[in-house]
Structures are given as structure tokens and as C-alpha cells.
Amino acid sequence: MSDYSARLEKAREITAAAAAVSLSFFRNDPETEIKADQSPVTLADKATEQSLRDSLQDQFPGETIFGEEFGRTGEGAAMWIIDPIDGTRSFIAGLPLFGMLLGYLEDGHPKLGVIHMPALGEAYAGGEGLPASCNGTPIRTRACRSLDDARLFINEGDKLAVSEADVFRRLVRAGQLRRLGADCYPHALVARGLADAVVDYDLQPYDYLPVSAVVAAAGGIMTDWQGKPLSMTSDGRTVTAATPELHVELLDLLNRP
């Protein structure tokens, strides 16, 4: 078993254990605070991240960890990156579409990723040189090559409509089927071959880097809006596509004058 394969298996086990922590708070109205960036955080976010950190430190002692709630520990170039509850607003509202993200980076580039959906009982995983899977079953993106035929998710539509109004107007007219969404699950659906594309906005590295590893392992593409590979310093605007041809069309739509 390769080092990446072994690490991915441990990552799946670690997120499965932490899922029980987040579910213990779900729909129990956990205490909520508002952070400096006006995003909410609950006791569930903090407890889940602590569970993930404890397990990572046990399995990979001394390795660097960067999480949404507790920041960075360690200085190594290789790093685990955590979003304990991706979709805290969904979590607070009782919507079961919140996820848990865990990724492994080397020199800032995503090598492994897990998208765990605790309330749905679905775990998506994949990595460089490894196949993508959902609950252990191999998954693959659809062969959709045309935006006219695409099942398109527009994430963070409320923010896009205000900050990128022209782009939003083009997006709501694009694709064969459109849905407004948020957070990690639409990207997982692209990896699974149920959707074809996601345009996302205002993300942080822990939101997109673990997800991008899963999408790539499934045969898809996830970049910034300029088509550049995602990194710790990307601007938080991402596009996910099932095929290179669809990716090119989406980039053209996003960058029209």
C-alpha cells in the first residue's frame, strides 16, 4: 500500500469518527457565536475540529495541521487542512447538507481529500494517483462536454448577485439544469457523476483544497476563475467541471467583459 493510499484510509477513518461528534449536536440548537468575518461558529464546529486534530496527532504525530477554528500548529511543508463543518449555516438551520472536509497538502498542493457528509452517511475520498470513491464504491465524473447540456450548480448565489452581478446574470441563464447551492456537496455530486459543474465564490483554503483533490481523482477539474491551479493563496473564486471542454466554456462565461 502506497503512503498516499495508507494516509487516505486513515483520513477516512478519522472523519468517520468525528462525524459522530458533529451529529451529536445536529438539530439540538448548539450555542452559536459570530466571528470577526461575520460567519457563524458553533460548539459543534469546535468540538468536531478538536476530534479531528486529536486523531491526526495520534496517527501522524508532529505533522502540521491547519483548521478553520484553531488555526495552524506546526511549520512543516506537508500539512493536514480541516473544515470541521463546511456549511455551518446549513447545520444551524437543520439542513443535512453540511459536510466535513479533510485534506493533505504537500508544498501547498492538495494530494488527498475527504468530503464526509455526516447526516447523509456519505463519504467521498480520493487523491493523486488514487481513484475516487463514495463509501468505498468507485465514482467518476460524467462525460458532459457542453455547457448547454450541463447540470450546473451556482453556489453562494446571494453573494454573487451582489458582488458579481453580471456573472450571476449569465450563470442563471446557462446550462441545461441549474440549481442554487452552497458548500461542498455540489462539488461531491460532480465527482459522483450526478452534476457537471459548480461555480463557487468567497471560499477559504480549507473549503476548496480538500474538495479539489476528490474532484481531480474522479476525473474532473477544479481551478480558480482564471483557470489557475488552486493553492493556499487563491482568491476564493472557484470553478469545478466534469471535463476539460466544459471547464473551458465556464471560464469563458465567467470572464466575459
Image (cartoon, helix red, strand yellow):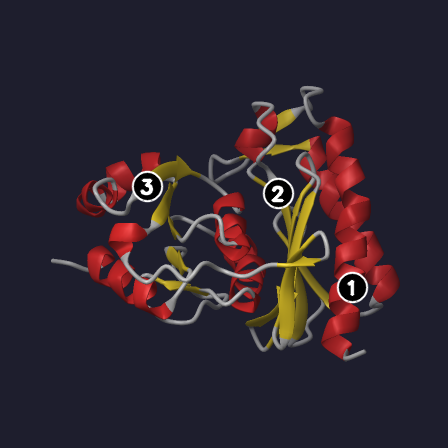
Residue 177 - label: 3
In the displayed structure, does residue 241 sit left or right of residue 57? Answer: left
**Which residue is depicted at the point 56% across and 23% down?**
93
Q: From the viewer's perspective, is the residue at label 3 or at label 1 nearer?
A: 3
Furthest residue to the right?
58
| Observer able to see residue 94 | yes
Q: Are marks 3 and 1 in contact (CB under 8 Å)?
A: no
Identify the image quadrant of the N terminus.
Answer: bottom right
- Of labels 3 and 2, earlier in sequence is 2
Q: Is residue 250 left or right of residue 38?
A: left
Say which of 141 and 228 sits in front: 141
Which label was assigned to residue 99? Answer: 2
Q: Nearer the viewer, mark 2 or mark 1?
A: 1
Quarter of the rendering containing residue 255 = bottom left
Three-letter residue code for mark 2 = Gly
Q: Residue at x 68, y 21 (%)?
A: 27
> Which residue corresponds to the image point at 55% horizontal and 57% vertical from the top-left?
211
Inspect the image, locate mark 3, and give the three-letter code of the amino acid beneath it: Leu
Picture layout, residue 115 above or below residue 31? below
Residue 72 seen from this side: no
Whichever of labels 2 and 1 marks the residue nearer the N terminus, that label is 1
Identify the residue shown where x is 37% and y is 36%. Answer: 180
Q: Secondary structure at mark 3?
A: strand
What label sits on residue 87 in the rendered view? none
Nearer to us: label 3 or label 2 = 3
Q: Position of residue 131 (x, y in %)?
A: 63, 69
* Disc 2 secondary structure class: strand
Q: What residue is disc 1 on?
A: 9
Q: How far from the left and from the top, in percent, is residue 12?
A: 75, 56
Q: CA distance from mark 3 to mark 1?
A: 35 Å
Identified by mark 1, the residue type is Glu
